[in-house]
Amino acid sequence: MFSRRRIRRTVLGPLVAGTAMIGAAGLTAVPAHAAPAGVTVALNGSVLTVTGDAGNNGLVVGRTPAGTITLNGAVVLGGTATTATVSLIHMDGGAGDDTLKFDETNGVMPQGEFVGGDGRDKITGGSGADTIVGGPGNDRVVGGPGNDTVSLGADTDEFTLNTGDGNDHLDGGAGTDGLIVNGSPTIPSFTETVLVSANGPRTTLRRVQPTAPSTVIQDVLDVGGVEQVKLNLASGPTDARPNSVSVAGLGTDISVMRVNLGSFVSPNPGLRNTFNISGTDGPDRIRIAGSAAKGVSVSGAGSGAVLVTGAQFFGVSGNAGDDVIDAGVLPAGTVETLIESGDASPILTPGGNDILVGSPGNDELFGGVGDDRLEGRGGNDILDGGAGNNVIIP
């Protein structure tokens, strides 16, 4: 039989191991702070700092529904750190292959600063305007909602932008870096559009979603130091909406952009996966190639090559300058093609002397102003040379 003293120790033992919270469901135990070995947690004013050691740290900072901040599910610093008292959380993984993450299952986290340090790190931000530094090593970063500033650092890194992740500024740094832009898996009712434009070495991507009576720019990403870009707008195995990408130039840092428009198919010609690309204001030599199975590739429209899959309509504009646009090796049935020289009207400026070559499929070629040469290369084509002394070959 237990003595009275023994019974007291048995009952109280579990309670001193944690902090008790009483809610509508009754008594819920939340573990007290028990930081992993080698990890330090400090609170200085409104700044909470979590620092890892030279090992491979897995650090997940979250919160309880009431706002008490947790580390790997345990309350830190006896519950004195809360979302009401902490305005900034600084996480430093140190050396090693670290995982640094905000968990917002129970609510929005404060602003974050993430430093991966040496090693192959995985970093996931929160809803605030976070600052993320990958450091040396091959890092994988997801900014999360909020307007983030991201520096990937040296080596081969990757940054992922999901729908609703806000307006971010990304610097890839040294090494061959990648950017993945994912489409929305949950919005099937209208076309999702991505607009791409160049600004010197940098590239700007804008995600636009139409909302009557106008449009909403949902995400803006300013990218530099990134060499490979993937736009994955497919919304799932069975796409329920058309998608559109328009490229008005790539920054000189980008060597290749891969575009997946998804598998949406509709008999309505107004509902098609669409890709448009424009050349520069100088002389361009744009070549369009590919197949229905492998997609369409475009080269010569400024810096970098573009590879496109899932497009039913493909538009190319040379803009100003003496351009050569050639789709002659594109097999019939690959994609409907519209090719324009892009020259302005004679009232504004003289046009270029362009060469436009269609595919064996059904093309639309428009020469604009200038002395142009249009070659249909078979199919049911529309060939319009515009003003000037033009040569038109069906």
Image: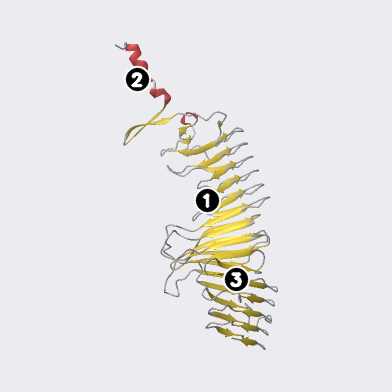
For marks 1 and 3, the one nearer the N-term is: 1
User: Where's residue 191, x and y in %?
Assistant: 46, 66
Q: CA distance from mark 1 to mark 3?
A: 39 Å
Q: Secondary structure at mark 2?
A: helix
User: Where's residue 105, x and y in %?
Assistant: 43, 43
Q: CA distance from mark 3 to mark 2?
A: 76 Å
Specify whether 155 is left or right of 107.
right
User: Where's residue 221, x and y in %?
Assistant: 58, 57
Per the image, the residue denoted by label 3 is 289
Is label 3 or label 2 in front? Answer: 3
Q: How many marks?
A: 3
In the picture, which quadrant includes the N terminus? Answer: top left
75 or 81, which lies in front?
75
Q: Secondary structure at mark 1?
A: loop
Q: Check contact, mark 3 vs mark 2: CB within 8 A.
A: no
For marks 3 and 2, the one nearer the N-term is: 2
Residue density around tag 2, few if under 14, some if 14–19, many if 20 or more, within 10 Å: few
Q: Quadrant of residue 291?
A: bottom right
Per the image, the residue denoted by label 2 is 11
Circle on res. 146: 1
